[in-house]
Image (spheres, rainbow, N blue to C red):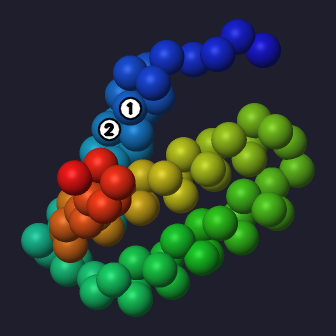
Amino acid sequence: MIPISRWVIYKEIELERGYQDRTHGSLDERNPSIDEWLEILHTELEEVYEAKSNDHKLEELLQVVSVGVACLEQHGVIRRKELQ
């Protein structure tokens, strides 16, 4: 398999985030707590494990990553100490 550029992946995450906002409402409208985001992530991750094909697993994984990004958008990012 040919490696995919991070920028291509980041663009797909951005597109998925837009889809999530259109489908579920913006972060301002929803305002989940971190624990609520973790519950959503858990549910989405279960869907990755339940997927039958690798393509479906990758579709579900994109949703997991995008949900994690949404949580960080809403609650902030804590930079790793080694990078400060």
Q: Which mark is residue 14?
A: 2
Report, in whole angstroms, how far the alpha carbon at label 2 lies from the one at label 1.
6 Å
Tag 2 near tag 1, CB within 8 Å: yes
Q: Position of residue 29 (x, y in %)?
A: 14, 74
The image quarter in which residue 15 lies: top left
* Residue ID at (28%, 82%): 32
Q: Position of residue 57 (x, y in %)?
A: 74, 47
Judging depth in this view, the residue of 72 and 45 nearest the camera is 72
* Residue ID at (64%, 16%): 3
Which of the two marks, 2 or 1, is nearer to us in this view? 1
* Residue ID at (71%, 64%): 47
The image quarter in which residue 27 lies: bottom left
Q: Amino acid at mark 1?
A: Tyr
Q: How many marks?
A: 2
Left or right of 60 on screen, residue 1: right
Judging depth in this view, the residue of 57 and 10 nearest the camera is 10
List the residue tagged with mark 1: 10
Q: Amino acid at mark 2?
A: Glu
